[in-house]
Amino acid sequence: MENIIELNKDGSLIVPDTPVIPYIPGDGTGPDIWNATRLVLDKAVKTAYKGDKRILFKEIPAGEDSFKKTGEWLPKKTLEQIQKYKVAIKGPLTTPVGHGMRSLNVAIRQELDLFACIRPAKYIQGVPSPCSKPEDIDMIIFRENTEDIYLGIEWEAGTKEAKEVLNFINKKTSKNLDETTTGIGIKPISEQYTKRLISKAIQYAIDNDRENVTIMHKGNIMKYTEGAFLKWGYEVGKDEFKDSIITEQALWDLFDGNVPEGKIVLKDRIADSIFQQVLLRPAEYDVLATTNLNGDYISDACAAQVGGLGLAPGANMSDEVALFEATHGTAPKYAGQNKVNPGSVILSGVMMFEHLGWQNVADMIVEALQRTITQKTVTYDLERQMEGATKVSTSGFADAIINNL
Ligand code: NAP
């Protein structure tokens, strides 16, 4: 078992010098960006450790390629391998249409109970941004990954099930919903799943010396789902992190807004408000914790502030398993063109190295990426926003980063 990452009792990782890390290349543009990423990751490890450490990448099947070869979109063995090796990385996967599966990505997250989707939005020097002070942007979003509308409980208008649910609603409320023309979706939010997500977000803030955690919600309208998420979030702060947390309310009531030494501020913002806050006052937000759908929206919006989806990394985590992946999809119109930005998967690799404790490799890649962008050698998505930049292909961008390592 010498190449397998193990866990200590406290959940920390025991990482061998040559860990096996499974990867899924992905569909559409996935293989292009994965192949480019792999070259960068391997070269960075080699440069940092001179051969003493190495990742043993191991391909595991999922998506279109897997379906063509095995008849299965998401083989059970693939999930078992991710579970076994505890850390994996993937490219984006197509959502199969008409195969009974809502989304492969959602299926992987739910099957492995990867309950926290973690997406940083941090400005890299030289990246074009629509914001006036992009250097103030250094946020990390914790998105609940297993419930909310992503559970896929919905019924089409006119079906027997939709009619039954609508009939129930009409009987129990003063509403008079049309039972034949109305579609229905259900949004479950539970105390236990909310609390484990918010606990992880606060623990991250503590471990990484962040100043505040903001619960993003739409509790003013959806009181028993989003509103409950907010209430349970504050309960976690009070019950599990009493010594580390101060609420924004207490901060102003008792300390005139001056944060006491060693305290992290726990605050909340309504979803619509946070969208303008992250644009206008990003320096006031460190860690955001939110529900599944809110997290999907806000993470793309924050990504747009720091270079767009081509530079938007992410991780899906439980307390044991971590699966790193770009925030974006397969961008099918660019498939096989060696065109799109591999930065999103490269930065997901950076998150992976941070998770492994190989911080020097992570730092080295970020520096090389930053240097490459400052030299204005970029893929099409950044080039179209920059004056006088040189447009390079996916592999060309990886080569330029490698030259800067
Ligand atoms: P998308 O693949 O995210 O692409 C939307 C647009 O984002 C692209 O047209 C492109 O913008 C930009 N973009 C995405 N990746 C980029 C990159 N690496 N470099 C530069 N620009 C990039 O969204 P979609 O077209 O709606 O979804 C396509 C498929 O992906 C669907 O089957 C969807 O279900 C799936 N999906 C998978 C995941 C996942 O695997 N985690 C996530 C989301 C969606 P421009 O057109 O402006 O160049």
Image (tube, grey):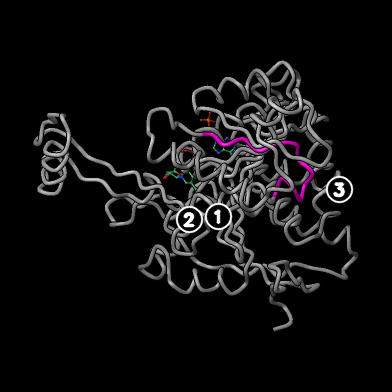
**Residue that appears at 50% across and 28% down:** 271
The residue identified by callout 1 is 196
Q: Are marks 2 and 1 in contact (CB under 8 Å)?
A: yes
The secondary structure type at the circle numbered 1 is helix
Which residue occupies the foreground of this view, 123 or 365?
123
Residue 5 visible (yes or no): no
Asked whether 139 or 22 is in front, the reply is 139
The outermost residue toward the right is 50
**Percent from the top left, x then y, of residue 255?**
76, 27
Residue 384 location in percent, x, y? Answer: 64, 23
Residue 405 circle label: 3
Q: Residue at (70%, 49%) from the top-left corner?
A: 204
Q: Earlier in the sequence, mark 3 or mark 1?
A: 1
Q: Nearer the viewer, mark 3 or mark 2?
A: 2
Residue 278 left/right relative to 195: right
The reply to whether residue 133 is in sight is yes
Residue 13 position in % (x across, y down)? 73, 68
Mark 3 and mark 2: Cα distance apart in space: 44 Å
Q: Is mark 1 within 8 Å of ligand 1?
A: no
Residue 401 x/y as whole percent: 79, 44
Circle 2 is placed at which residue position? 192
Q: Is residue 268 left or right of residue 15?
A: left
Q: What's the mark number on residue 378?
A: none
* Image: magenta residue range: 204-216
Q: Quadrant of the N terminus?
A: bottom right
The image quarter containing residue 343 is: top right
